[in-house]
Amino acid sequence: MNFTHFFHSLLTIINEMSPYILLGFIIAGFLHVFIKPQMMSRHLAGSGVKPVVKAALLGIPLPLCSCGVLPTAVSLRRQGASRGAVTSFLIATPQTGVDSIAATYSLLGLPFAILRPIGALVGSVFGGVSVQKFAANDSIVEEAAGKCHDGECEAGEPESKTSFMAKIGEAFRYGLVDMVGNVGKWLVIGLVIAALITVLVPDELFLGLADYPLLAMLLMVVVSVPMYVCATGSIPIALSLIAKGLTPGVGFVLLMAGPAANFASMMILSKSIGRRSTLIYTASVIVTSLAFGLMIDYLLPRGWFMPAVSNYVASCHSEFGLFETMCSIVLAGLLVYTGIKGRISQKEHSRLVEKSKINNDMKQVFYVQGMECAHCEASVRKAIAALAGVDSVSVDRHAGTAVVEGEIPAELVRGAIFDAGFTVKE
């Protein structure tokens, strides 16, 4: 392998993405701080198409992966959001996000950046309406949603008073630390795969498939569904595949199907919203991806989608700009920092687990299934910490454990974890 070509391709993609993805992370932080589930749920109650459309529009800019969106969806359901609206939110949110839309624009150009949220909107509305019509009794766990009936919810815990400047700081912290920690692993994997495709895959390998776009799209579905790749991490892979000869429509299928319709998310969803709703969810993602992919290849001018790819191929042989290089250095520093921080936290949590087993003190260890990202981890931690009698709680998604200290029955902790959208392994 030509390592010089590999690293140059890798740095080219990073430089193209880094300014936009940093901006997307910061915007994501502000959305996280200033848009709360309580605010969203007021617009998502009731029947009909209107709440379903609102749910899609609210979910499209939110930067949540297919596992991280589940606790938010459960919270929305508990606060009165309709079944169809929650399903629409579940479909739209993992496919896009302000960070991935910005990164899509940076690498693939404006047409892809516009069509991606439009595709998410169409697929989520189709799925939400279908669930309302065909899976009315197969929705978000009603036992966990028992606090709300027809949009009237019990009063939740009062929101703490936080200064505006503190919220600004929290927005930057969430965007540049938590968000980077959430997508960092998958972003790096996507970048490395993209660079390997650029270096190792012969240009003529995909030329035959380019003559049969539908077959190539179906193969892309087969490949992308078992994969877990976030909305941002799929972008460099799609760019490299298009640069090697696959059609823009095939690349679009990867962008839409990969982040939302994977085995990990479907297993979690099946336990939470039921099998019929999960089948509708998956079918909506796949059918919409294929429909938009075919539209791109057969109805829209190819010239709309190829300039960005051509620019990428040309930039592989050009020098790097100062601003882009500085943004790439900042992004790399954030990735290293969050990686080290996560590793230290994981080791501290593991020591806490072993200590609780040896001392047999007031600490209880719960094995939580379904945590895949920092958002999942934070949701479980927040749900347990809100219980009366809990003195401290430590959660680690890598080990799949939660260590709880305090005089509190285990059944209450299991119930809080279940209400947050996860299950506890006995």
Image: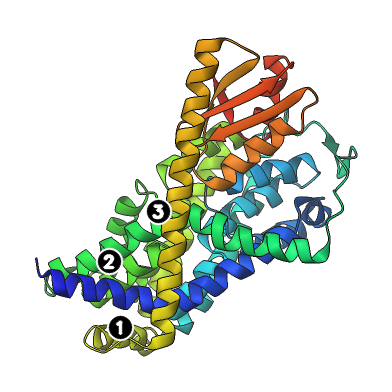
Q: Quadrant of residue 23?
A: bottom right
Q: Within 10 angstroms of label 1, few (less than 14), some, or many (20 or more) residues?
A: many
Marks 3 and 1 close (CB-CB < 8 Å): no
The residue drawn where x is 45% and y is 34% is 347
349 or 280, which lies in front? 349
- Cα separation, mark 3 vs mark 2, equals 14 Å
- Determine whether the residue tagged by mark 3 lies in a helix, strand or loop: helix
Q: Nearer the viewer, mark 3 or mark 1?
A: 3
- Determine whether the residue tagged by mark 2 lies in a helix, strand or loop: helix
- Circle nearer the N terminus (3, 2): 3
Q: Is residue 386 above or below residue 37?
A: above
- Cα separation, mark 3 vs mark 1, equals 23 Å
The residue drawn where x is 63% and y is 70% is 27
**Does residue 381 appear to the left or right of 258 in the view shown?**
right
Q: Within 10 angstroms of label 2, few (less than 14), some, or many (20 or more) residues?
A: many
Q: Quadrant of residue 415?
A: top right
Q: Which mark is residue 312?
A: 1
The residue drawn where x is 50% and y is 42% is 279
Marks 3 and 2 close (CB-CB < 8 Å): no
- Cα separation, mark 1 vs mark 2, equals 12 Å
Q: Please state the total of marks drawn on the protein image.
A: 3
Q: Within 10 angstroms of label 3, few (less than 14), some, or many (20 or more) residues?
A: some
Q: Nearer the viewer, mark 3 or mark 2?
A: 3
Amino acid type for the residue under numbered disc 2? Ala
Marks 1 and 2 close (CB-CB < 8 Å): no
Q: How is the image coloured?
A: rainbow
Q: Which residue is mark 2?
A: 194
Residue 308 visible here: yes
Question: In the image, residue 37 lies at what x, y percent?
Answer: 75, 51
Amino acid type for the residue under numbered disc 1? Tyr
